[in-house]
Image: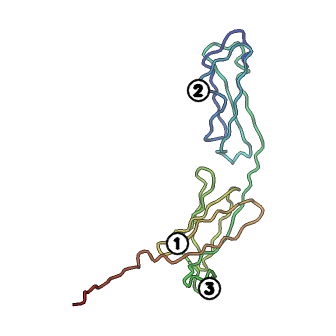
Amino acid sequence: MNAGTGTATGVRLTDSGTLASHTWNGFTGMYIVLAPGQTAEGSTWAYIADFTEDVVRLQVEVTSAEPDAEPADNLVTITAPLTVVRGGFTGIAYGDYNRNHVLDPGEVLPGLRIQASGQGAGWSAETVTDSQGRFAFHDLLAGTWHVYPSSPDWTFTYPAVEVDGVSEPEVVLRGEYDITGWLTGSARLSAST
């Protein structure tokens, strides 16, 4: 609120803290004008950039082009406790040679690279299946994670897994043999005489 007696021009909101990738709604343009007694409200949503402090901290400062009689009331710091929920999931990957949709002996895929991507920017993890085709992702942030197995010989669907910090879902990755590069054919045509 402009508590002064004159119009404030070039009013600008700046912030710092543990949030990333955010913008303020309610502030049209970079600078706004506030008449005496007028209020401006804004809201924001953001990703939390730093989980190490166990708090969300946001410091907001409002400045204007004119000198301020009370600059001390232009800065506010908001701090809230942060509870980070982490969890994981495990799974097995197999190549369904006989296409019966059942994991049969000899179908596990050891050494398969698997990537998991979360909903936040930069939320990714990678692992490789063990000799039994098993894999595990632990200590992931709660939310939806997409699983991407990578193989030149097998095609997979890319399932989504909900990590909730309570249970560790079991994911089964069924590969179908990719025969794209294997199909060839020839034909001989002759005409009867």
Q: Tell me which residue sits at (61%, 72%) in the image.
A: 173
Q: Which residue is mark 1?
A: 155
Q: Point out the tag, 3 or 1, that comes first from the N-terminus.
A: 3
Disc 2 and disc 1: Cα gap in Å? 48 Å
CB within 8 Å, label 2 to label 3: no
Q: Which residue is mark 2?
A: 29
Disc 3 and disc 1: Cα gap in Å? 18 Å
Q: Point out the tag, 2 or 3, that comes first from the N-terminus.
A: 2
Please state if 87 lies on the left or on the right of 114 as rendered. right
Where is residue 119 drawn, in percent x and y?
A: 63, 53
Where is residue 130 drawn, in percent x and y?
A: 59, 76
The numbered dot on residue 181 is: none
Q: Which residue is mark 3?
A: 104
Please state if 69 lies on the left or on the right of 129 as rendered. right
CB within 8 Å, label 3 to label 1: no
Where is residue 63 drawn, in percent x and y?
A: 64, 21
| Residue 175, picture quadrant | bottom right
Against 108, residue 21 (above or below) is above
Against 70, residue 145 (above or below) is below
Against 173, residue 41 (above or below) is above
Where is residue 67 drawn, in percent x and y?
A: 64, 13
Q: Secondary structure at mark 2?
A: loop
Q: Tell me which residue sits at (32%, 82%) in the image.
A: 186
Q: Secondary structure at mark 1?
A: strand
